[in-house]
Amino acid sequence: MARVTREMVENSGIDLDELVELLVKNAAAELTTFY
């Protein structure tokens, strides 16, 4: 399932690695501001 989703995202022209990196940074920022 995850592979299909990844292929769909990549086919739509989005750089998945960049997207994941942004999500991780946002999650880290949320955690640091939360605690």
Image (cartoon, helix red, strand yellow):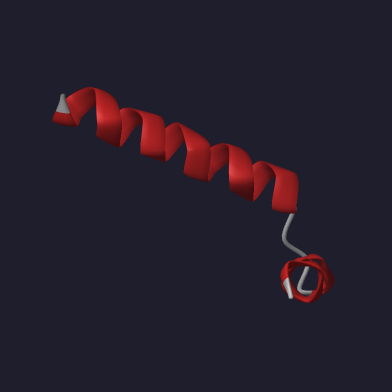
Say which quarter of the image contains residue 2.
bottom right
What residue is at 62 percent from the left and 49 percent from the top?
A: 19
How many numbered circles does the render carry?
0
As displayed, is residue 2 above or below residue 32? below
Q: Residue at x 67, y 43 (%)?
A: 18
Q: Going by the image, does 18 lie left or right of 29?
A: right
Q: Position of residue 5 (x, y in %)?
A: 72, 73
Q: 1 or 9, which lies in front?
A: 1
Q: 24 left or right of 8?
A: left
Give residue 26's position: percent from left, percent from top: 40, 38
Q: At x 83% / y 70%, what residue is drawn?
A: 7
Q: Quadrant of the N terminus?
A: bottom right
Looking at this view, name the residue that lies furthest to the front: 1
> Residue 22's x, y, as percent?
53, 41
In percent of the image, x 27 and y 31: which residue is there? 31
Quadrant assignment, res 34: top left
Rendered location of residue 25, percent (x, y): 46, 32
Picture quarter with the C terminus: top left
Side of 9 relative to 11 (left or right): left
